[in-house]
Image (cartoon, rainbow, N blue to C red):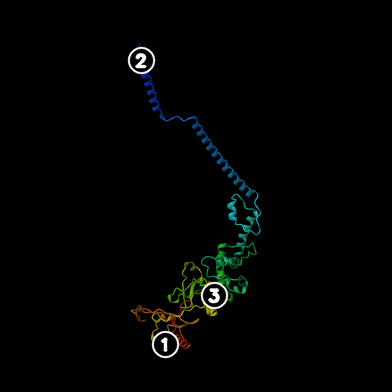
Amino acid sequence: MDHDARQRSTDISEIQNQSGSRQRKDNNNEPGGGNPRPTAGENQHQEDEEEEEEEEEEEEEEEEEEIEQEEQENVGGLAEDPAEPDENLVVDDSAHEQLSPGRVAPRDELNYDTDTSASVTDSLTWISWFCSLAGHEYFAEVAEDFIEDDFNLTGLTTYVPFYKEALEMILDVEPEDDSVKVPEVSLVESSAEILYGMIHQRYILTRQGLSQMNAKYESAHFGYCPRVYCQPSKVVPCGRSDVPGDGEVVLFCPNCMDIYHPPSSRYHCIDGAYFGTSFPHLLFQTYRESTSILAPSPTASLSSPEPPCDLQSKSGFMSDSVTPYNSSRSKIYGPRIYGFRVSERARSGPRMQWLRIRPRTEEQLRLGLEYREREPVEEVEGS
């Protein structure tokens, strides 16, 4: 009996041990198995941290809302009740508009801008507008009192169609009789350009006009001579005829006494009659001290040869000579091969050097005039 009882107790203990080991294996196989379960204190601590984080986020959101509300109140206050500006304070409109983008300019400010633009337009006369156009830089602004004098306009009606309408346009005068049919504006503008050009030809021969053109000349407003031996000699505009339609404007150099085409094509549409044939020579006779005549350098003998002996003995002309406007000498290019001057009798020799040869003394000038009387030279157009 005792033996059977001990045997049963042993079997029961083995069964309990097996069930306990099986339960431990099941616990290990479960997710998170093997980890100790959190205690009640740890769960409470984790909940407190989450609550603190939520409270901090709510506080940050409230602060951001307060800042946005303050900014809106500030902008609304500037738009509804702007401060009165100080009279002595200069305010930048662009900066003010950046501070208050919703601000609308008052009516008086808009009227002020309109009045300013209108006053600028009213102050710009037709003469100022015409002289400011591209390609019209050579023109001087003719005084209105000169145009209003009928004596200065004598004989211009033969050159200008719609003379009366063109004159009214130049002087910015409204037509006297509205019932008269006014021709097309394009025709009147073309006539006004011709009329102003012919008035300009006469105006620049007066003392006031010469003074204006001399100021342009001294500031090199018309440019420089393209000839190598004349640089940097300044030039002035002139024409080869006093009648409109006979040729475009050209540039006259007082150093080489020759004329050249303007370097820019925008001046090719300007009539030479608007400056005339007398202007450059009267200018240099009036302002002799302003004439820029270049003297040759001491080493210019190689490039400025003497003229042929037979021509020099007959006419007395020399290659380095005075000009009509100054006592300085001009330079003449002489072709050379290996340092030897090319003969004028050669096929490639110089042919027109005598055109730039001028006398040095009155005796040489007298001999030259006598030679010209014996063998007259045909003058080119405009000379």
Relative to 221, residue 121 above or below? above
Dividing the picture into quadrants, the one containing residue 8 is top left
Q: Is residue 51 left or right of residue 338?
A: right
Q: Amino acid at mark 1?
A: Lys
Q: Residue at x 58, y 76 (%)?
A: 207
Relative to 319, residue 176 above or below? above
Q: Amino acid at mark 2?
A: Arg
Q: Which residue is mark 2?
A: 6
CA separation in Å, label 3 and label 2: 146 Å
Callout in the foreground (2, 1): 2
Q: Position of residue 168 (x, y in %)?
A: 61, 66
Circle 1: element type: helix
- Disc 2 + disc 1, Cβ < 8 Å: no
Q: Is residue 90 left or right of residue 271?
A: right
Q: Residue at x 62, y 60 (%)?
A: 116
Q: Residue at x 48, y 30 (%)?
A: 39
Pointer 2 or 1: first along the chain? 2
Pointer 3 or 2: first along the chain? 2
Q: Which residue is mark 3?
A: 214
Q: Which residue is mark 1?
A: 314
CA separation in Å, label 3 and label 1: 39 Å
The residue at the far left in this view is 338
Circle 2: element type: helix
Q: Is residue 106 left or right of residue 190?
A: right
CA separation in Å, label 2 and label 1: 170 Å
